[in-house]
Image (cartoon, helix red, strand yellow):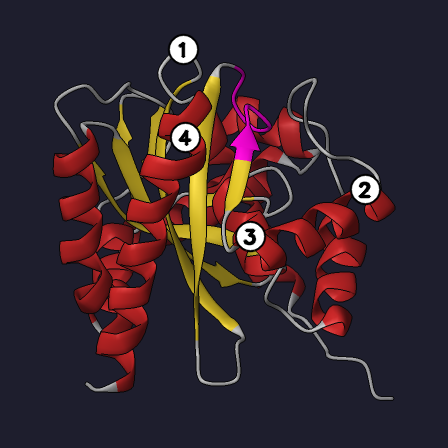
Amino acid sequence: MKRDVTVDATETTFRILEMLKELDGAGVTELATRLDIPKSTVHNHLVTLRKNEYVVKHGTTYRVGLQFLEFGEHTRNRMKIYDIARPEVEGLAEETGELSNFLVEEHGLGAYLCRARGDRAVRVDTYAGMRVHLHCTGLGKAMLAHMPEARVSEILDRRGLEPRTETTITDRDTLYEALAAIRERGYAIDHGERLSGLRCVAAPITDDADNAVGAVSVSGPSSRMKGEQLEKDISELVMSAANVIELNMSHS
């Protein structure tokens, strides 16, 4: 099989942008040190990015520019499922008072398309556009449970099972058992597997072939998300929202 050919200079540009995001801004010297790239190379890439308005400069510090937001909004707004899911996400947040989320998969990672906060919602690190590993979130596990086995294996080979907390599933067999249980009961639970103390109930959104195209969830502190409220009340609300999204997708 012929290997894809990549452009080294372009890959360097993306490495610089990713590091700028990770550091929330940096100067030439810090970027060069972190990435092990000559300062002159880093400088040339930053000058080019700034000229094309993809980074901004304050003093000696460069940051990712707002033009990326325009790209993200363009991408999100062209997705039919976003417009269909958003009212249900907002309704879940209002009804439960907690944080509700909608996630899709791309390149083996989950990407949050939208979120809504109820009047009791806790503040967490997620935001629209953020990408997360699938194995450590309720949303991601709900989607993995409704993907072809070969696709799940491909994602795990590429992305691994990185531990995020003490409860993260890091063994394939254990994960496969969890996915089978999710398929049987219709929803997934995240027991603080990405963020300690945060519990989540998520339901998959599937197409006519029962393949996942997204997932919707409600998240809240473990002190509130427990017992019958978690296993019955919230799970039924989340599955109902997923069902509405599926129906609207089929008839839109």
- Residue 220 placed where, x, y %? 35, 24
Q: Residue 185: which disc?
A: 3
For disc 4, the neighbor class at 10 Å (few under 14, some 14 to 19, many from 20) is some
Q: Which residue is drawn at 70% across and 56% down?
A: 180
| Pointers 1 and 3 in contact (C-beta within 8 Å) | no
Which residue appears at 19% of the width and 54% of the height?
Answer: 88
Element class at badge 4:
helix
Q: Which amino acid does label 2 sit on?
A: Thr
Mark 1: which amino acid? Ser
Whether residue 208 is situated above or below residue 147 in the rendered picture: below
Between 230 and 17, the one lying in front of the other is 230
How would you rate the neighbour count of disc 2 (Cα within 10 Å): few for under 14, some for 14-19, many for 20 or more?
few
**Residue carrying label 2:** 174
- In space, the residues marked 4 and 3 are separated at their CA atoms by 13 Å
Between 249 and 113, the one lying in front of the other is 249
Q: Dot 1, how many residues are within 10 Å of its Cα: few (below 14), some (14-19), or many (20+)?
A: few
Rendering coords of residue 26 (x, y %):
44, 25
- Left or right of 252? Residue 132 is right
- Reading the chain from its start, which is encountered first: label 4 or label 2? 2
Secondary structure under badge 1? Answer: loop
**What residue does disc 1 label?**
223
Say whether disc 1 or disc 2 marks the residue closer to the N-terminus: 2
Q: What residue type is labelled 4?
A: Leu
Q: Is mark 3 on a helix, strand or loop?
A: helix
Quadrant of the frame with the C terminus = bottom left
Residue kind at label 3, given as amino acid type: Arg
Q: In which quarter of the image is the N terminus?
A: bottom right
N-term-proximal mark, 4 vs 1: 1
Residue 162 included in the magenta stretch of the image: no
